[in-house]
Every structure is written in structure tokens, then in C-alpha cells.
Amino acid sequence: MRMIRKNSPASFPVGLPTVYEHLRVNLGEDDQPIDHALINAYVDAATDYLDGYGGILCRCLITQSWELLLDGFPAFIKLPLPPVQSIASITYDHPSGASIILPDSEYLLIGAGSDHAFISPARGKTWPSAAPGPDAVRVEFVTGYGDDPEDVPAGIRQAVIEMVADRYAFRESAAIGAAFSSMPSASADALGRFVFYGAIGQ
């Protein structure tokens, strides 16, 4: 199994004005603090630490799309990175060598919006035969809580804000763009229930 991000989120999982207010920074005429680039970089780094296939939550926050690559059709296609919204396409390599898009009438998405979404053949249908080989089946899907930061659970949003606040408080020792390798204990406690353990061993 491999994962490829096809489309990145269009926004952060927290509103920047909310972050600025929490940090109690002075805003200029453009409603941004003087060091907004630094703060935005910390928000970006905190998001990267949590979000997506490499994030510690093993889930997606703001709407984005991913491609799951498989060596063949399993009985059911378990989808990582909840909460899955929809299936964009399923493409497979036919034994003849052709690349074929499977009609959406041939399959069902079960458990959309939950932590355990999967795809099954539609009633009375079976998976087609795919050519043997790596990445023979490619599933593109849309996932995330929604397009707006307010769609993201409050516990996750608050954890991101606390991570940024902690990094900002000790900014003299943290470079712009520096990745997070840990987080404040309060953030870790808040995020514990959002970790998707189903991703382990996918």
C-alpha cells in the first residue's frame, strides 16, 4: 500500500485571527501582526505534525484528496485517513494492459464520515480482475472534516493553537519552518482521543 496526496488543504485547521487573539499580539493596519509570517509558519508546522498520512493523528483535518495505491483488489478496500467524505475514482490496470476507470455503480462507500470507511462491490457485483503488479489498483478519495476551520473538532483546533503558542513563546530557539517533534502536554492530552489507530498495520 502506498499513499499520495493529490490536493492539499486550502486553509489551516484554525483561523489565523483566532491564533493572533490567543497570542495577544498587536495587529497592524492590515489586521496582521508584524511577525505574521513567523506565526503562520508555526501554524503550518503544527498542522503538518498532525495532519495527513505522515501526521501523528493519522487523519485529515481540512478537506483534501489522496490516492491509495494497491497491488490488487482485496475483498473490501479499507480507507485510511478518516473522515472520508467521498470516492473520486477507482482506476485499475486490466490484464490487457489498459487502464480502466471503474464505474461508480460498481461499488459502494460504506461508513463515510466515520473512522472506519471502506469500499465494497455493489450488491450483486464483484471486483474485476486486475493485472498483477504494484499499484495495479488506484483509489482517489476526498477526506477531511470540511472546508472551514470550524468544521474541525474544537479539541484539535485548541491543540494546534497551544502548540503554536508554545513555539511562539520560545521563538528565539526555533527557526521559521522548523518541524515539530513534540508538543505541550495539554495538547497531547487533548489530541489523544483523535488518534486513528486503525491506520497502524494498514
Image (tube, rainbow, N blue to C red):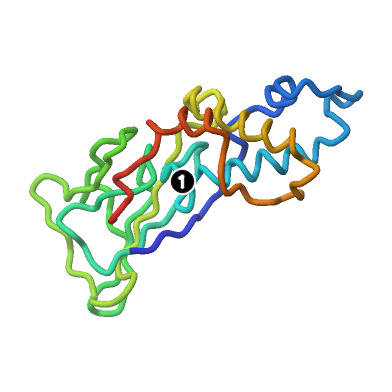
Amino acid found under the numbered disc labelled 1: Ile
For residue 126, above or below residue 172: below
Q: Position of residue 98 (x, y in %)?
A: 31, 75
The residue furthest bottom is: 96
- In which quadrant of the rendered view does residue 182 lie? top right
Q: Residue at x 51, y 42 (%)?
A: 50
The N terminus lies in quadrant: bottom left
Residue under numbered circle 1: 56
Q: Position of residue 181 (x, y in %)?
A: 57, 49
Q: Position of residue 7 (x, y in %)?
A: 54, 51
- In which quadrant of the rendered view does residue 150 lie? top right
Q: Residue at x 55, y 46 (%)?
A: 49
The residue furthest left is: 124
Side of 52 relative to 181 (left or right): left
Side of 68 relative to 78 (left or right): right
- Dot 1 falls on a residue whose secondary structure is loop
Q: Residues within 10 Å of mark 1 (few under 14, many from 20)?
A: some
Q: Residue at x 65, y 43 (%)?
A: 44
Count of numbered labels shown in the rendering: 1
Q: Residue at x 22, y 44 (%)?
A: 108
For residue 161, above or below residue 102: above
The C terminus lies in quadrant: bottom left
For residue 105, above or below residue 18: below
Q: Position of residue 19 (x, y in %)?
A: 69, 26
Depth check: 48 or 3 in front?
Answer: 48
